Image (spheres, rainbow, N blue to C red):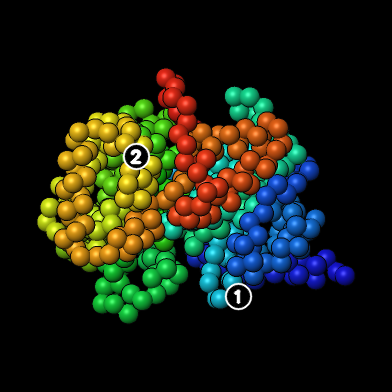
Amino acid sequence: MTEKKKANEIGWNFDNSYTRLPDIFFRTVDPNPVQAPKLIILNDRLAASLGLNIKELESEEGVSVLAGNRKPEGGTPLAQAYAGHQFGHFTMLGDGRAMLLGELITPKGERFDLQLKGSGRTPYSRGGDGRAALGPMLREYIISEAMHGLGIPTTRSLAVVTTGETIMRETPLPGAILTRIAASHIRVGTFQYAVKWGSVEELRTLADHTIQRHYPEVEGDKNRYLSLLKEVIKRQAALIAKWQLVGFIHGVMNTDNMTISGETIDYGPCAFMDQYDPATVFSSIDREGRYAYGNQPYIGGWNLARFAETLLPLLHDEQDQAVKLAQDAISDYMKLYHANWLEGMRAKLGIFDKETDDEVLIADLLTLMEKQRADYTNTFRALSFVKPEGTGIFAHPEFANWHERWLSRLERQNKPKDAVQELMQSSNPAVIPRNHRVEEALEAAVEKGDYSVLERLLNVLSTPYANTPDQAEFCILPTPTTVPYRTYCGT
């Protein structure tokens, strides 16, 4: 059997539309071979949905592609250029340690980017080796797949391959490469790059490409670029509301980490909140709390304003009119976000209809949770069973008053109790990737080569709303400690 035929048996089906953009937006790159690639974990279900042959993907040929040692048949490896505001400061960026292999067309006709993360230096590398460590790549695999299980738009993780090499950070670490699947890797920062270093026509070409790929329904609109802006605002408002509803903290909401497709991307110092506190920050580099849990909706608006600025040359020939169109669109963001969040909070409390006092009811519960240092996920999970335990927040006199008001609210909507409970249990996850559970899985994998802990965690996280008996232990809180939990970018 020829090597080419063997490669085709994996199921690669590429159509690389990004390469048809002006070359200002990317640089083609060659594979950066690693010493001894070994497949550690493969997302079988995702692979099958992409039309890939799992057995062949696990072969030497398949692993060599996942390790960046060989180009896949039909792929055109490239590094994408982009810029971004990082903690508010604008800078030139680009794929410094990632390589887009191409765009896969699935059996259903869907298009997804296939990207290797940690695959070595590129023309956009700003220093370092362009490699990644095993721990951070496994963290992204866990969290991104957990987000998918929670029903939150996200990039996906197809595989992790160890490289057989040691990379140097503060200590020597085993190297690894993550294969990431995304609707695309077009970012707010991609548009910022176009405005700063490209022409208006190159910006227009990027915008047209983005519309064709993600928002083809607006192509015929009178002002399709204004429609593009509005659609991106809608998706981001919905996305960030979903983050807030499950207590997810991204940790590094730079403009280069906001996709135009509306997917969550770049799981670096991300984590999930245990006790409810809007000021929660886990990232070791976010010393001022810019990206704290409670700030995420506002940072989303700030990032979208930066996106709107990039589109000004396309919105209208007159600058003042372009600015007004952009401002009017951006002014809708917080209203859209709040509507999404409020609808989600009503569902978490089993509320089907709308009353003006609902926001007060929700706010009073969150205030009580913050005062009592209640666990965010477990509080709502307990309420989902209508009979919360009489300990912690549930034993507090203020809760008794709130609980009575809540039950009265449920009675007024005239819905059967089983319907209320079904809505709540489908809106409140029983399990999230608890930080101590993630660390436990990473330690077993990285330090001991034991992937059974990680595999069990992934299995539980794949159905977070199931409320099955085997999930009970994953709802248990970590042992209290005086040392705050910290996360790191993992570069």
Which element is circle 2 on?
loop
Q: Could you tell me residue 454's position as x and y percent?
A: 62, 43
Residue 183 against residue 137 in the figure, above or below: below
Q: Residues within 10 Å of mark 1 (few under 14, many from 20)?
A: few
Nearest to N terminus: mark 2 or mark 1:
1
Dividing the picture into quarters, in which one does residue 285 lie?
top left
Horizontally, is 306 left or right of 142 in the view? left
Horizontally, is 334 left or right of 381 in the view? left
C-alpha distance separating marks 2 and 1: 49 Å
Mark identifier at residue 155: none
On the image, numbered disc 1 is attached to which residue? 107
Q: Could you tell me residue 181's position as x and y percent?
A: 56, 58
Tell me what residue is drawn at x 59 percent, y 71 percent: 106
Q: Could you tell me residue 124's position as x and y percent?
A: 54, 45
Tell me what residue is drawn at x 59 percent, y 24 percent: 170
Is residue 330 visible to us here? no
Tell me what residue is drawn at x 55 percent, y 47 percent: 470
**On the rendered image, what quadrant is the C terminus found in?**
top right
Is residue 488 visible to us here? yes
Q: Amino acid at mark 2?
A: Glu
Foreground residue among 376 and 187: 376
Q: Residues within 10 Å of mark 2 (few under 14, many from 20)?
A: few
**On the rendered image, what quadrant is the N terminus found in?**
bottom right
Q: Amino acid at mark 1?
A: Pro
Dividing the picture into quarters, in which one does residue 236 lie?
bottom left
On the image, numbered disc 2 is attached to which residue? 389
Furthest residue toward top? 482
Foreground residue among 314 and 7: 7
